[in-house]
Image: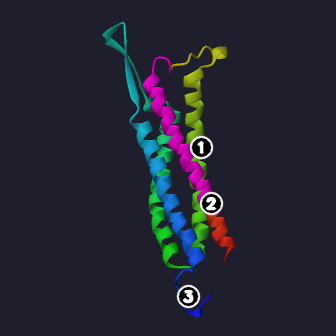
Amino acid sequence: MKPAALQLGVAPPANRGLAILDFFLRLIAIVGTLASAIAMATTNQTLPFFSQFVRFRAKFSDLPSFTFFVVASSIVTAYLVLSLAISILHIAKANVVNTRVLLLVLDTAAMGLLMAGSAAATAIVQLAHNGNNKVNWFAICQQYNDFCKRVSGSLIGSYAGVVVLILLILLSGVALSRR
């Protein structure tokens, strides 16, 4: 490299490329986790039973696992929005190792929280789709089809967010190993 290319405080091209990729992956994760939280939080369906006066309603807040999913997705989304500032700092400066380590630790915690929320909601969705004959729990997705479709779609966005967070963790590991 030319001596002029290594200015103090300016990221080398390889590290800058990783920092830019980190920024865009964070944006993708924000979209996935925010969309999944909104889709789950706005999910409800009402079915009439015998008449219009007696109705059965399915809401996400009726199931604690879905509530945990919405809270976990919202926390991870807020963290990802706040971490964009640090990601921008990594684009501008090369010598910020401490913040890279901090992002590595916090990304790992965020991935664990999002995975826990997604797994809890997945267990309930599987039960809603298939039921459990051994304990006489019947599948409800034949009656609440729109509810189940929306909840399942929400899980897809959440698992996409988990995959992006795993990529961010790996990217931080690569960036730290280059120093």
Labels 1 and 2 touching (C-beta < 8 A): no
From the top left corner, tell me how far across and down residue 165 is, in percent: 58, 55
**Circle 3 Cα neighbour tier, 10 Å, few/some/many (<14 / 14–19 / ≥20):** few
Rendered position, 8 above or below 176: below
Q: Say whether residue 42 is left or right of residue 115.
A: left
Residue 68 in view here: no
Q: Earlier in the sequence, mark 1 or mark 2?
A: 1
Of pointers 3 and 2, the one earlier in the residue sequence: 3
Foreground label between 1 and 3: 3
Residue assigned mark 3: 5
Per the model, the C-alpha gap separating discs 3 and 2 is: 28 Å
Instruction: Name the residue that disc number 1 marks.
Output: 116
* SS for callout 1: helix
Q: Residue 13: which disc? A: none
Magenta stretch: includes residue 154 = yes
> Which mark is in front, 1 or 2?
2
Q: Is residue 138 above or below residue 106?
A: above
Name which residue type carries label 3. Ala
Q: Looking at this rendering, what residue extends furthest in the bottom direction?
A: 3
In the orientation shown, which residue stands out farthest toward the top? 50
Where does label 2 land, which residue? 169
Count of numbered circles on the image: 3
Q: Position of residue 174 (x, y in %)?
A: 66, 67
Q: Residues within 10 Å of mark 2 (few under 14, many from 20)?
A: many
Please tell me whether mark 2 sits on a helix, a strand or a loop: helix
Quarter of the image with the N terminus is bottom right
